[in-house]
Image (cartoon, rainbow, N blue to C red):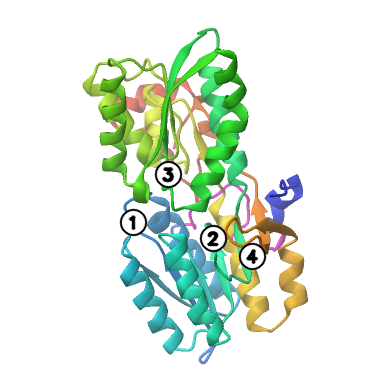
Amino acid sequence: MRRTPAVLTAVACCLGLLLAACGNNAPPPSAPGAPVAAGAPRVGVILPDTATSARWAHSDEPLLREALRERGLVPIVQNAQGDAQKFTQIADSMLSRRVQVLIIAAPSGDVGATVQQRAQRLGVPVIDYDRLNAGGSADYYVSFDHEAVGALQAGALSDALRGRPGAQVIEIGGAGTDHNAALVHRGQSEQLGPRYDSGELRLVSSRFVEGWDNQAGGRVFEQLLTANGGRVDGVLAANDGLAASVITVLQKYGLAGTVPVTGQDMTVDGLRAILQGYQAATVFKPIHQEAAVTAELAAALVRHDRAAADSLAGHRVRDPATGREVKSALLAPRLITRDDIKSVLGPGRIRAEEICRGELAGTCRQLGITS
């Protein structure tokens, strides 16, 4: 996978649509829906679930709706709630309604590839959104550099464990069937592999968690922790949901706050955990940019303007199952630690009052975080 040049981080902003400033992950609360002409082209969007991460309902759905409407398209958005059969049924329904483009974030690569085959037979182009479906036939792929996500997580954990030779690490990854989880793990391994080999850090165990299931992740972590005599010095958790489950177990064993934990997705709970001292960092992925580029691609495909679509997807990502080079647009993630939180809050984003409530009010004042 080619690395993303810095200019791609600003692609969505330069498109001049959706939001006025970069750094947001949610639309302005009072933003009116863009008017769409009667008979406008319909675009289907299928999201995977609402349980593994708050982002799908809180950020992706409203941002995609707004971005598509801004481009004169009618968004038809549904969530499969983690059910592979439901995902396929939704796709069949959308194809029968003659959507002109299908945007999918599938719960697994196999399901996504199956849906793409059906769309291909009907001549409907498909955009893989956020997750590449290995073995699939997507026309385009829009996401983030997930190897960079893993590298950022690994770097944050290394920094937190600096000066602690032989520190013991447990890795809790995402779904083994999700190509993104594999990319995140690859980025982590590139950073931490040499440290494990040298003995600077010691890998206790590394496990993927089926379906990114947070509760299952907590159970897996507790099993690994108890098998290691109740000792761990750092946890490489793949996202904020898994991190929250890990932290719950650490609290049970009296270790929360002394064991750094990583995350991803910059959720409200993740930011609060950072302020509480339970989580070392999260990774911010500017979803508004992802939604804007995806909508622009969809608009180009509706116009049958492949040249415009190709200009937005200047990278190539290799499908690990087939070796096919998929035209891709990749955006750059950003590490968020305690000192960075203030810079990513504000109107149209996560609000200070969402994370500063209750016992964290004083901590927020100390850090200059105000609503």
Q: Which residues are magenta?
A: 14-28
**What is the CA distance from the residue labelled 4 to the residue labelled 2?**
31 Å
Q: Is residue 12 visible?
A: no
Q: Nearer the viewer, mark 1 or mark 4?
A: 1
Q: Nearer the viewer, mark 4 or mark 3?
A: 3
Whether 128 is among the magenta residues is no
Quarter of the rendering containing residue 198: top right
**What is the CA distance from the residue labelled 4 to the residue labelled 3?**
32 Å
Residue reaching furthest front?
322
Give the position of the C terminus as an image quadrant.
top left
SS of the residue under disc 3: loop
Image location (x, y in percent) of residue 112 = 47, 67
Earlier in the chain: of badge 3 and badge 2, it is 2
**What is the CA distance from the residue labelled 1 to the residue labelled 2?**
22 Å
Image location (x, y in percent) of residue 93 = 38, 83
Circle 2: is it few (<14), some (14-19), or many (20+) Cα within 10 Å? Answer: many
Circle 4: is it few (<14), some (14-19), or many (20+) Cα within 10 Å? Answer: some
Type of amino acid under label 3 = Gly
Q: Nearer the viewer, mark 1 or mark 2?
A: 2
Q: Is residue 140 above or below residue 206?
A: below
